[in-house]
Each structure stands twice: as C-alpha cells, then as structure tokens.
Amino acid sequence: MSAWLPLAAFVPLVAGALTSALARRRPRLAQGWALAAAAWTLLAATVLTRRLFLEGPFSYAMGGWAAPWGIELRFDAWSAASLFIALIMLAVLVYSGPYARDEIESRRLPWYYSLLLLNLGGMVGFACAGDLFNLFVFMELVSVSSYALVAVGGGRIAALAAFKYLLAGAVSSALVLFCIGVLHALTGSLNMADVALRLAEIDSRGPVVLALAGLSAGFMLKAALFPLHLWLPDAHAAAPCPVSAVLSALVVKIGIIGLLRTHAVFAGVEGLPMAAFGQVLAWLGALAIVAGALFALFQDDIKLMLAYSTVSNIGYIVLGLGLANHAAMTGAGIHVLNHAIIKATLFLAAGAIIHQTGSRTLRELRGVGRMMPWSALAVSIGALSIAGLPPTAGFLGKWYIALGAFAAGQPGFAAVLLLGALLIFAYYIRILNAFYFRAPIDDNMRSVREAPLPMLLPILFLAALCILGGLFGRWPVALVAPAVERLAGGG
Amino acid sequence: MEVIDSRIVLAPAISLACALLIFISGRRAAWRSTLALGAAALKFAVILSLLPGSLQGTVYAYRLFDFPPGIGIAFRADALGMFFALVSSTLWVLTTVYAIGYMKDRPQKLRFFGFFSLCISTTVGIAFAENLLTLLLCYEALTVCTYPLLVHDETPEALRAGRKYLVYTLAGGALILFGVVMVQHLAGTLSLSQPGILPADAPPPMLLAVFWALVAGFGVKAAIMPLHGWLPSAMVAPTPVSALLHAVAVVKAGVFGLLRVVYNVFGVELLAVLGYAAWLAALAAFTIVAGSLMAMAQDNLKRRLAYSTVSQLSYIVLAAALLTPLAALAAIAHIANQAFAKITMFFVAGAVEQATGRRQVHELAGMGRVMPWTMGAFTVASLSFIGVPLFAGFVTKWYLSLGALQAEAWWFVLLMILSALLNAAYWLPIVYLAWFRAPRGLPARVGETGWLLLAPTLAAAAYVVLLGVTTRVPGMPFSLAEAAVNFVSGTRGGG
C-alpha cells in the first residue's frame, strides 16, 4: 500500500529517462508513452490522496531505513498538490499531441516528452520529499528540465529566455543548497521533522536566522515573488504554450511549497523573529499583487499578460502565508491549487488561439471569439475565475485571505487584495473586448478554425474545473485545513 | 413559516436554461423569439404561483451549494424579495415583446437575446438571495451579463460607455466584497433572513467602514450622486437595454442591495442607534434635486430620462434611510412605481426613434398627433413622476411624506414638493410640445409603430394608472410590500 508513494514519484522519472531511447526510431510513440506514465502518476496520486483523507499524513521509509537516518517520503496535505500536478500534466500531454507536432521539430519530440515527464516526477517528488537533501535534488530536477523546456521550441528568443531563467534558477538553487548545508552543520540531520526538533535545542540564533532568510529568499526567487520575478515573464512567454502552462501553473508553486516546508521547519523554534518575517512576506505579497497586475495591464502580448498575472497571483499566495493565521493560510493553500487549474486553462486556451491564428497580440486577435467560440469561452471562464468572481475557483482563495486580513487586524491588506482583483479584471476585460467586441483588423481572421479536439478537450475539462472547483470548494478546504492548523498553531 | 421549495431555484434556472438554448440553437428568429417569450412567461407564472403562499406569510427557501463551508449559495423568497422578483418578471415579459419588435432588423440578435435572458436570471437570483454572498454573486454576474448588451452596437462610443460602466460597477462590486468580508468577520454569518445581523457591540469604526463600503458599493448601481456617471453614458445602448438597465435589472439591483443592507444587514434598530442613515438621507436628498436639475439641461430624450432615473432612484434610498415603517412602505412600493413609469418612457423613446429617427426633445413637436397612443402613454408616465394623484408616483410621495413626518423630519416633505415642481418643469414641456404644437418636417406616412412595440408600452402605462388607483393590482399586490415592512420594522405599518 505505501509503495504507491515512491512509485508516484519515480515512475515518471524512469519513464522520462527511457523516453528518448524508446522513441528513437518512432518519435510518435513518445506521446503515448508519456501519457501512460502520467496517467499512472495520476492514479497513484489519487490513491495516496484518498488515503490522506481517510488516515491523515503518512510516511514511507526508502529501503526500510527509518527516519531520521533513512530517506523518508512523506505524504501530507501539501503533497496532495501532486494530484493537481498529475492532473494538469496529463491535460498538457493530451494537448501536446497536435500542438507539438506542428510547433516542435520532430527529432526533438522525444526530448520534449521526456523533459515533461522528468518535470512531473520532480514536482511530485518535491511535494512528497521528507528530507532537505531530496527536496533539493527534486527541485533541481524540476528546474533543469524547466530550463530545457523553455528552449525546446528553438529560436534565439527562447534560448535567451531560457538562459536568463537558468541564471536566476542557479542563484536560487545555490542559496537553498548553502542553507541546507548550514542546517546540516547545525543539527547534523537532514530529515525535516528531525531538523525542526533539533533546531529548538540550538542556542546560537545567528546561523538559524541566516538559514531561514536564505531558504526563504531562494524559494521566493523560484516562486518569482516580486521584485525577484524578472526572469519569469520572458521565460513563460517564450516557451511553447503547453510548457508555459506547466511553468506558470505548477513550477512556480515549487517555490511556494518550499516556503511552506521551510516555515514548518522553523515554526517551532523559539526566539526567531517569525512575526516580523510574516510581515515582510505579507508586504512583499501585497506589493507583488499590485505590481504584477499593473505590469499585466500594459502588455499587448497575451502570453506576457498571463505571465504577469502569475506574478500577481503568487503575491496573493505569499500575502496569505505572511498573514499567518488560520483563514489566510487556508486561502493561500487553496489558491495554490486553484490558481494552478485556472492558469493552466488560460495558457492552454490562449495557446490554442495562438496556434490556430498564428498571432499573439491583442490587436491581431480581434474578433477571434466568433471563429473559435470554445477556446474563447475557456479564456472567458478562466478570466472570470482568476479575477475572483464568485462562485468560480479563484474566489475561494481570495475570500479566505481577505477574511484572514481582517482577523489579523490589517484590513489594509484586504483592500490591496480587492484592488488587485479589480486590476486583474481590468486587463482580462481588455482580452475579452478584443476577442468578442472588436472587428478583426484583416480578413485572415475569417478563415481561422476552432482548435482540433485533442487540444479542445483538455481546455474545456480544465475550464469546467474552474467552475466546479468553486462550487465544490469545501473539498479543497477540507484538504488544506488540517495542515494549516498545524502550521498556524505552531507559528 | 419557512418551507423548502425548489420553485425559487426554478425561477432563475428557467432563464438560464433559456439563455443556453438560445446560445446553442437560436439561429432562427422565430424559434429564438418563441424561446425568449416562452421563458419569460414561464418564469412569470412560476413566480406568480409563489404569490398566494407569500401573501399568507410563507417564506420559501432552498439551499443549493455549500461553498465555502458554512456560506452556501442559497435562495430564500421573503416578502421583499418576492416583490422585487414580481416587478422584474412582469416587466420582463413586456420588455421581451418589445425587444423582439425593436431588434428585428439589427445584427447579432443571438448574442443579444442570450445575454438578455441571463440578465433576468441573475436579477431574480438577486431578489431571492438568502445571503450576502449569493447576492454579490448574482450582482457581479449581472454586471458581466449586461456588458455585451451595452456594447451591442460595437461603436467606439459604445465601447467607451461599456468601459465606463465596468469601471464603475466592478469597483462597486469590489467595495461590496470588502464589506461582505467585514460582515462575515464581525457577525460570523451572511444570512439575510434576520432583521439585522451585525452585533451592536462591534467596534464603531468597523461598523462605519462596513456601512460605507456596502452603501458606496451598491450606490454605484443605485446611481447615488456622485457615483452616477456611468448611467447617462450607458444611453448609447439599444433602447430595450436601456429599459432593462433603468427599470428592471441593474439600477434596481443596486437599490435592492441597499434595502437589504439597511433592513437585513444592519437592521433598522442598529442604524437608528448609530445614526449613519442621516448621511445617506442627505446624500439621497441632494441626488433627488441635483438629478432633476441635470435632467432639465438635457436635450437628448434618453439622457433626460437617465438623469430622471438618477433622481427617482434616490426616492427609494431616501425612504429607506428615514427608517420609519411608512417610509419603508414608500421605498418598497417605489421599486414598482418607478419601474413601470420609467419603462413606459423608454418604450416611448424607442418607438419614436424607430418611427421617426428623432432623439432630441425639441424634435418632438406635434408627435402626439402622429403617434397618439404612444405619446398618451408618455403623458401618463410624466404625470406619475410629477406625483399627480391617481397615478403611481403619488403613492410613493404620499407615504414618503408621511414617513418623513413619522421621523420628525418635515423638511423632506418640502423636498417632495420641490421635486414635484422640478419634475413638472422637465416633463410638462415635452407633453406640451407633443400635443399642442404642429408637427414639423415629418413625412406624411409616419404613424404608430407595430403592435410589438405599442402593446408593451400601453400595458406598462396601464400599470402606472392601476398602481395609482388601487392597492389590488393583479400580480403586484400592495399587501406584499406591507408584509415586507412588517417584517423589517416588527410593527404594523400604515396604509
């Protein structure tokens, strides 16, 4: 039963490593192979999440060596994100069929699928890692495959964006690795639960604060928290659309989950300025909300717009974490999951539109709503949802974070949150206006056709989730609430 | 007595289903019209079937979803909600007939009728909302659904007006959300089934913040000055849409939200203690006068109508802010009175434009001789706005004045008289022009419009008279308003 846990992470990794060898002669096979591996991961994640609901968090000791000496994989509420990760990755893989065939050289196709699988395995592993070292290893797997994925479509812009992403990523990885080293030197242990216990007995505060600050900064860079976001817009906009969906919806969340894990390690330690730390996070989050939304407002490239919207939404999540009370952290946790679904919907739908029309600026996309009604509908639903219109999925997180702001006695943050939602709405209105209410600027638009079914199905599936995720919001709340109880109670 | 009844979900669901059907299969005009009209009639019938129970004090309720935990999407039809729903669904039937006639030769009818149906679905949702969250949800959905109608013509001017509308209403929506979160934080519930949920011992600055957030939020759609700017520019929309914005859905949603805030969120008692309502009353009084003065300066008929709406809506706000039972009666009754009179005027404006292409007030000379029925309806509505007895508007002014005296605020009675004079000053010249001047420059064969435009106009005008002469108008009972007043004030209202 507990063997599902390692299988969930390692099957996609092994499958990913084998892809290019298997598909060397027949590149077409690669997609089927990747789909099978992702479906397996989804199955495993479902089984694991079900067990989590029934029994609460559980661990698996690799090779039978018990923690703190052995490698521990742990499945808790944050690991349940792997269910969403697998689900979205599966949607992306289905979508990739027609997309990658047209946009990516056929000799690169096996690499493309192989990288996506490595990315998937890395993320699931990261979400389930119980010790700091494996946390780092999985993070690097995700990062390296992401750099490569940005560049996989070819072209100078993509290569440059990937290089920029690599530089930022390398800085962040170095910071994280350094601080893990510090923690190991201090406590002699790498298992996170164990490190948390031993930290409490350490008297010197300097190195501990250094480790906290370094880990936080490293993960913030990974999460593209404003003002550390500079790498994100280029990377997300230059990558092929399915990759953008993965990067924006999932990969940045690695930084968030990393922050949560860090928080959990340090939460029990006395004498740390955790309150001040929380305030810094909250202010940075608030800043990111407004700045990200403002940047998005002035883009004409639809993918850049979506990328900046991610910067803004990461701000919501970090604000929720920083407020550090029960309601706010519940909101942050839910928004991690819901934003993943919404942003994947938006990027995939926008990708379909870009793929079919060949243009990506709002000006050139005028009137596309009549030619591609389903894709445009998905964009509309995603837009309403990300603006936080009830009862869509995007509303829940904001609702709880706003409640948390009042509970923390800082209603100003609730006002910022709403201002951000308004700005977000303003720029999505621009998209919808262009799609539906403006006349096309040339006649090419009249010959545009709706995307093929393999692209359309995942888009509509995710768009439906954007609504259902809100209507049946008590499930994610039930998932996140106990984990938050431990965190907020400890901090 | 509260009973669980799925009919109150059925009412919004009918229009929703109708909208989906239109989007999917509404390419053919006949089928589309049948759908739209059938749904309007069916919805009216469903709401009417709830009326007998409602009159006997039954409250219908239905819970749909529980999201987030504890705060669900739930519906509940109390007397106030029933009244608003009845007004909207009655007008809906009329507007649909009118729209079918008016839109006959215009493009993009599929989108128009689809979103048209969505709008009424959300309006009934607002009327039947059990909690603030459901109310807000429907309120925001209404904003989104009216936008495509507003920019229907896709001209730069329409797009500009649409943008303005969205900026105003979405900012208002965000303020409401802010207030709703605070209510949840302070009261621990969002239910609208009590006469007041906010605790009296909450910190006063918080209560003040809640009050202004909610009032300013709903005040945008209720067009309280200085938040009214979107309404006159929204006049670029096709006439049935203007009618919808002004009489049925949008502005009434704002006013209805304000009534809910006053009666169900704060409650009359708490507001009386806090004294915030005096500010609201002052703001409303200012709007009544200023709106009328602005209306006088307009030569475009629809713009004059728009400023008149701004002024008239504040009657409701003022009446609610007086916090006395008789004024509450005026507030609720005026939802119907203003709606029927205003929709009559819009129907007339649209019909005149359709028949002659004229939009300016000074071009209306002699119109009564060419289109006697249409201008007759206009005259009825004008007299109602001025407050002549035996017309609907008089009932409002009467109870509002009594309510003001109950509240020992006699100067509002003077305000009523002043407002009547102002109304006379900008409506009577039109009536005079239409009947007592000779028509100029009109082609010989111009006459009344077709029945599709004329019949709803006359029906609405008939309602204006009926509401003024009897308290037993079929389907629009005064006693329902009384029942609502009894609930909010806990005492016997007069009348």
Image (cartoon, grey):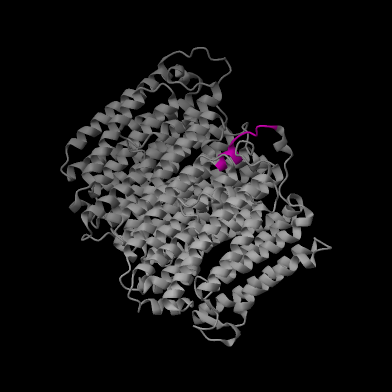
User: Given the current orientation, which residue lies at the most extreme right position?
Assistant: A25
Residue span colored magenta:
A431-442
Q: Does residue A155 sit above or below A216 in this rendering? A: above
**Toward which corner of the image does residue B337 lie, by quadrant?**
top left
Residue A341 visible? The answer is: no
Question: Residue B281, percent across and down?
Answer: 24, 41
Q: Does residue B247 sit above or below A268 in this rendering? A: above
Q: Does residue B414 sit above or below B138 in this rendering? A: above
Q: Residue at x 69, y 32 (%)?
A: A442
User: Given the current orientation, which residue lies at the most extreme left position?
Assistant: B408
Does A434 appear in magenta?
Answer: yes
In the image: residue B160, left or right of residue A114: left
**Toward which corner of the image does residue A305 lie, by quadrant?**
top right
Does A34 appear in magenta?
Answer: no
Q: Residue at x 47, y 59 (%)?
A: A220
Q: Residue B50 or A45: which is nearer the viewer? A: A45
In the image: residue A259, left or right of residue A31: left
Residue A227 visible? The answer is: yes
If the image is split into quadrants, where does the C terminus of chain A sit?
Answer: bottom left
Question: Residue A328, percent across and down?
Answer: 39, 63
Q: Residue at x 24, y 47 (%)?
A: B326
